[in-house]
Amino acid sequence: MNIAIIGIGNILMTDEGTGVRAVEYLKERYLLPDSVSIIDGGTMGLDLLPYIEGKEKVMLIDAVNIGREPGAIVVIEND
């Protein structure tokens, strides 16, 4: 399976680059198969499209304000 895990965020802004720090953690502590790409997406926005193209699964890690307590983990699927 061809998978991309992309961390999004700005380490200089209020989200402290949550997604970026998460993928750094994964890279440092886990040996993942070649079929899994770990990507620091930073603030690339639409420039991430080439990294997503052709992937069977994509996981985006980011901080979002959804009205829940800080640190809550939320899964948003499909749409």
Image (cartoon, helix red, strand yellow):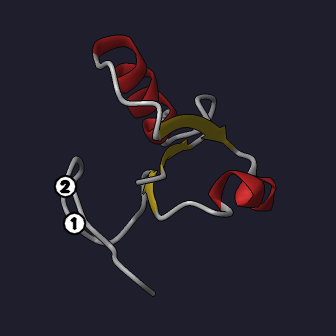
Q: Amino acid at mark 2?
A: Ala
Q: Nearer the viewer, residue 10 or 67?
A: 10
Q: Residue furthest right?
A: 47
Q: Quadrant of the C terminus?
A: bottom left
Residue found at x 63% / y 29%: 12
Residue found at x 81% / y 54%: 47
Q: Position of residue 18 (x, y in %)?
A: 43, 38
Q: Is residue 37 left or right of residue 12?
A: left
Residue found at x 42% / y 52%: 63
Note whether 71 is above or below 27 in the view shown: below
Q: Nearer the viewer, residue 3 or 17?
A: 3
Q: Amino acid at mark 1?
A: Arg
Query: Which residue matches tag 2?
Result: 72
Depth check, mark 1 against mark 2: the one in front is 2
In the rendered structure, find residue 48 and report the number of the disc placed on it.
none
Residue 13: quadrant of the picture: top right
Residue found at x 75% / y 48%: 44
Q: Is residue 7 left or right of residue 59?
A: right
Q: Residue furthest top?
A: 28
Label 1 crowd bin: few (<14), some (14–19), many (20+), radius 10 Å: few
Q: Residue furthest bottom?
A: 79
Q: Position of residue 23 (x, y in %)?
A: 44, 31
Query: Which residue matches tag 1?
Result: 68
- Number of marks in the rendered image: 2
Q: Position of residue 75 (x, y in %)?
A: 26, 67
Note whether 14 is above or below 60 in the view shown: above
Looking at the rendered structure, the secondary structure element under dot 1 is loop
Tell me the CA gap for discs 1 and 2: 7 Å
CB within 8 Å, label 1 to label 2: yes
Q: Is residue 65 left or right of residue 20?
A: left
Looking at the rendered structure, the secondary structure element under dot 2 is loop
Label 2 crowd bin: few (<14), some (14–19), many (20+), radius 10 Å: few
